[in-house]
Amino acid sequence: MKLTDYTTLTPESVRAVVADAIEQADRLIAGAVAATGPRTYANTLDPLDRAITLTNDAYGVGGFMSQVHPDEPVRAAGAAAEEMHSKWVASLAFRRDLFDAVDEYCRTDDAAGLDGERRRNLDFWLRDFRRAGHALPAPDRERVEQLRNRLIEINVAFERNLAEWEDGIDMTAEELTGLPESYLERLEPGTNEGTRRVTVSYPDYVPFMDQARDRDARRRLQFKFLNRAATDNMPLLNEAVALRWEIARLLGYSTFAGYAMEPKMADPAAVADFYASIVPDLTRLGHDELAALQAMLERDCNAGRLAAWDWSYYDAAQRKQEYGVDDNEVAEYFPLESVVAGMFDICSDVFGIGFTEVPDPGAWHPDVAVYAISDSTSGEVIAHYYADLHPRRGKFSHAACWRLRAGVMTEDGYRPPVTVVAANFTKPTADSPSLLKHDEAVTLFHEFGHVLHNALTEVELPRFSGSQTERDFVEAPSQIMENWMWEPEVLQRFARHYRTGRPIPTELVDRMVAARDQNVALKTLRQVFYGHYDMALHGGDGPMDIEDAYYELVEMTLFPPHPDTHFGASFGHMASDGYVAGYYGYLWSKVYGDDMFSVFADEGVLSPAVGRCYRDAILARGGTRDGMDLLRDFLGREPSPNAFLKRIGLGGRDPA
């Protein structure tokens, strides 16, 4: 399969590829609307499927460049193309002519005889039309579409503001005390002689907050981090919240959460019950964990209450003191190249696939590596994977996976999917490879779970291909992947010291595993806070100011707020409609990811038999069935929260 040559892209070509695809797609849809004779799937819905495939492919060439391209004009053109594509996709459900065509088709014998993916596709289109307001008067439906388009504009602007944001502090040698020499060497010089610039990018920020001994320096850097893009993004997010509530009310929903969660596994009541079942015990355990960290602070200085800027520093210090786990020492066993090779090796054994790096792939930046993924049995290339793992100016600032090309059935046979992970791991230097902290390696495994979900799909239609599942199930195939990074027999296969090549010592692995659940209650309460914040904005009595929600809820984490900071301005999930009233999905999916991994734990964590079953029952099926049905297929029983509850320190009981 020919890959896109991204090296030839220009601002003009980025815009043109999306505009041309939309023009072709519009012709396909016009043909479907104007079809003569009896309506069939072939003349009504099949053109829609092909139109969506065309435009999604164009996004993977054009719109996606807003996230990763090294040249600012191309990123800007990509953002415009992304907005164009998103508005076009959203417009489909609002088209009255398309609604009439599909409505006419659904009353035919051909429609009545549909089954499998095609039946589900028709049902989902009918649901989309209903949720677009086709039962409303035309002016109200048009207003809903206007609001949706404005939300797309807000999302694109919000993400771009974050990606383009640059800030930091010039730190003195004293303020940098505690950071390893390898960290200091890669910092840029500051403006004043003898200083070094510590930015708010993740490769700078996270190690600094973990290891810098200067408490006030941590406070000042966190202040900068929590105020990224605040001036521009705060009004955008408040506007988005208000617009969502207007959509909900126009469509007859009591809350936006009720509207947004309708296509998901859970509803607002189920999420409230889920949180209520774990928060009291987590809070009790969290106070115990907090007391131990508070005691460490008091031994260092008489500084009052443990603050948000102390959390990661004392968490890392406690891990070192009580378990003998030094994050810097551990990182020496996780050079990025070895982690990638180990990840591929594990996936090869468990899932029956192989990886071959593609020479001269025509990627958008020299840092990007591209791999062909093949099926071990047939030897056929079944997917491609782009790995864009190092930071650069203007690039997406965290870690995520995108589908660039969906796996779908075409007239020429099955078309292999293409997917990408963009992350921000430390770049190698002349003296040292890129050394990953263990939690960074866990992040890579997590994102690669999304890659596998997209790469191993066997779904016919674009709507259900790969990770196109319910949004509160989509994280389960990535959550399960994290578990392999805590298995001693797995780590010792590939974790080797970057200088000596010696495998990670057994006793160090044992200490890492013992420390795995250190402060698990505090870490889980942080996730619960994010979910509550989301639901406060979208599931309460009406629109809530994003600042008020933050300061009202943040002490749920057991830490006070960082004064005068604007958390919401950089909480990108709240700008994206896919995660709105859905952040709970990370923990919700973890329940299922941990439950699925329990099958591996029982049968062998690297069992090819279990891996094949998981590949066939979960990864290959995409969104062709409800997530709960897929879980039952794989587990051979009803899903259970016991593995998850044990993991977060609440034993193996069912939630109250």
Image (cartoon, rainbow, N blue to C red):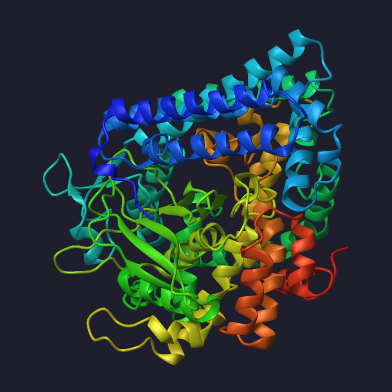
Residue reaching furthest to the left: 193
Where residue 149 appears, as percent x and y from the top left, is 58, 21
| Residue 294 higher or lower than 61, as above or below | below
| Residue visible at 45% across and 53% down in the picture | 419
Q: Nearer the viewer, residue 277 or 635?
A: 635
Residue 84 in view in this figure: no
Where residue 412 appears, as percent x and y from the top left, is 50, 52
- The quarter of the displayed image where residue 479 is located: bottom right
In which quadrant is the N terminus drawn?
bottom left
Horizontal side of 329 relative to 498 (left or right) equals right
Horizontal side of 554 relative to 132 (left or right) equals left
| Residue visible at 26% across and 50% down in the picture | 362
Label tally: 0
Horizontal side of 589 relative to 295 (left or right) equals right
| Residue 186 higher or lower than 257, as above or below | below
Residue reaching furthest to the front: 37
| Residue 246 higher or lower than 516, as above or below | above
| Residue visible at 39% across and 50% down in the picture | 218
- The quarter of the displayed image where residue 177 is located: bottom left
Residue 588 in view in this figure: yes
| Residue visible at 45% across and 24% down in the picture | 231
In which quadrant is the C terminus drawn?
bottom right
Q: Nearer the viewer, residue 545 or 156?
A: 156
- The quarter of the displayed image where residue 109 is located: top right
Q: Nearer the viewer, residue 521 or 385?
A: 385
Residue reaching furthest to the top: 139
| Residue 434 higher or lower than 646, as above or below | above
Where residue 517 appears, as percent x and y from the top left, is 60, 73
